[in-house]
Image (spheres, rainbow, N blue to C red):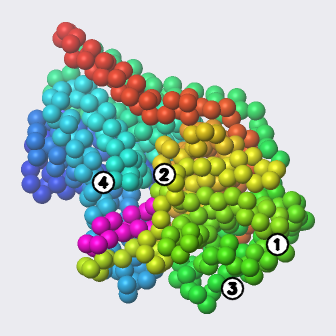
Amino acid sequence: MSRLKTIAQWVSMLRGWRRAALLLIAGAAAGLAMPPFYVWPLLFVAFPVLVWALEDVAGRRAFATGWLFGLGYFAVCFYWIGIAFLVDAATYLWMMPFMVGALAGGMALYWGLAALATAFIRQHGLARIISLAICLAIAEWLRGHLLTGFPWAAPGLAATGMGSFAQAASLIGMTGLTLFIVLWSALPALWGLASLRRREVIAAILLLALLPALWLWGAYRLSAASGNPATGIKLRIVQPNISQDDKWRADNARAIFDKLKKMSSDPTTPRPGGIGVVSVVIWPESSVSFFIDESEQGLSELADMLHEDTALVMGALRRDGKDHVYNSVLAFDGGANLVAHYDKWRLVPGGEFLPFEEILEPLGFRKVVTVPGSFTSGPGPSNITMPGIEPAGVLVCYEAIFQHDFIAPAERPSWIINVTNDGWFGRSSGPYQHLAQARLRTIEQGLPLARAANTGISAIIDSYGRIEASLDLGSEDVLDGTLPAALAPTVYARTGDWMLAGLSLLLCMAGIAVRQSPKP
C-alpha cells in the first residue's frame, strides 16, 4: 500500500508536459478496453490515475485534467474515422486532422466538464470517486443527446468483452454500465490516498462486490434461457463486400445490382433451394447507387428474382420529389411492390450532412457521402411491416449507437433490422465497435437483430446479445439463418434512462453516508 501511496503522490504532484503526457497515456490505455482489443483490466489502472490527478485541483486545471484524459481515450477509440478520408484522398485527405482531431477533442470536452464538476463538488476519498463516476455517466448521457448526439464508445461498451456481465444492460442500459464501470475501475485509487476511513474500505468492497454479483446474475440469465427458440422467419443476409472506391461510380451500378441479385438467388449449403425458401432477404445500407423505387427496369428485375413469399429489405437512396434525398430502407413484397419504407433520421455530421454548411463549404469542407446537397432527416423511429412478417424496428448505420428513441413509441417491434456500410473504415476497430453497440441494443431491449453490412460484419444476434451466426469482416458471402424469438420487454426497455437517475441518487446517498461516518 505504501508503494501505491507513493505513486498517487507522484501523479498528483506532476506538472507541465509530464502531467499532460501521463493523462494522455492513461486515457489511451482506457481506450484499449473497447472492441476489438477488450483489454478492460487496463481500466483499473487508467482511472486511478485520473482520480489521483484530480486530487486538490480546481477550476481550469481540473477541466484540463479531464479533457486530456478524454482526449487520449477518444483518440484511440476514434482513430479509424480517419480511414474514411483516404477513400478519395485527393479530395478529403487534408480534412482528416481537422475532422478527427476536432471530434476527439470535442468529445473530450464532456469529460473535462465532468472533471470540473467533480472538483467543484469538493469531496474526498470514496465520495470523490462516486462523484467522478456519476459526473462522467451524466457527461456520457449528454454526449448522446446534445448537438445531434454521438455516444460512440462509451466506457459501458467494454461490457461486451466481459462475458455474462454484459447482461446487466437489460437492467441499466449502456449509460448505467458506464456508471458502474467507471466507479469500479476508479476504486483502487482509494488505497493510494493519504487517509482512508475504515467505513470507506468496507463500502468500497461492497460496491466492488456488485461486479461479480452482476456477472453471476448474467450467467444465470443466460443459463436459464430456454435454448434458442426461433420464429420460423428464414433470413438471407447479403454481404457483397463492395469497396468504397467502386461503390459510387456510375459505371459500376449495373455490375453491383447484378451481383446483389445473384448472391440473393444462388443456392447455398444451408439453403439448397436458394431464394425460394427464404422469408426475408436483407441488403446492406445504400446497396445500390440509383433510385431503385423509381426504376421500372430495376423493379422488374427484382420481381423476377423474388419468390412470391419472399420479401426484400434493402438500404437505398429515396427521393421525395426532387429536393429531398433520404438514406432509407425500402421493403418490397414478392412482386417487388414497395410495401414499407423507413427514412434515417439520425444523420452523421460531416458524413451525410455538413453542420454550418454556409460557413464551412466556402472554406473547402465537404461531407463525405457524395450526393448533391445534404441528406434530409426522416421523421423519427418507426417500424416496417411486410406481408406475413412481424413488425421490425430499423436502424440505419450509426443509429445503432443510440440506446434511446429507436423503438417506435406506439408499437414495440418483434425484431430489429440494422443495415450499414462500414466499408469506409477498412479493417480497423470501427466495424467491431459498431457491431458491439448493436449487440448492446439487443440486450437492452430483449429483441433479436439481423445486421447486413456491406463489407461486414453481418450477423444474426439473439435477444441476449449472442451472435448466432456472422460473416467475417472483408468477406463476400451470404448469411443464411433463422430469426431468433423476442423476449418480454426488459427492465431497461420499460424504464429507459430513469435507471441512471435512480442509480446516481442511490450512489449519492451512499457517498454522503460514508463522508458523514465518524473516523475510527
Dot 3 or dot 2, earlier in sequence:
3
Q: What range of the chain is rendered magenta? A: 347-360
Residue 368 screen position, x and y as percent: 42, 74
Front-most of residues 14 and 87: 87
Dot 4 or dot 2, earlier in sequence:
4
Numbered tag placed on residue 107 in the rendering: 4
Dot 1 or dot 3, earlier in sequence:
3
Reading the image, the residue beneath label 1 is: 303
Q: Which residue type carries mark 2?
A: Ile
Q: CA distance from mark 1 to mark 3?
A: 17 Å
Q: Which residue type carries mark 4?
A: Met
Numbered tag placed on residue 254 in the rendering: 3
Please identify the dominant SS of the magenta region: loop
Query: Pointers 4 and 2 in contact (CB under 8 A)?
Result: no
Q: Nearer the viewer, mark 1 or mark 3?
A: 1
How many numbered marks are there?
4
Dot 4 or dot 3, earlier in sequence:
4
Residue 176 screen position, x and y as percent: 43, 34
Q: Nearer the viewer, mark 4 or mark 3?
A: 3
Residue 375 can be seen, yes or no: yes
Residue 9 screen position, x and y as percent: 14, 38
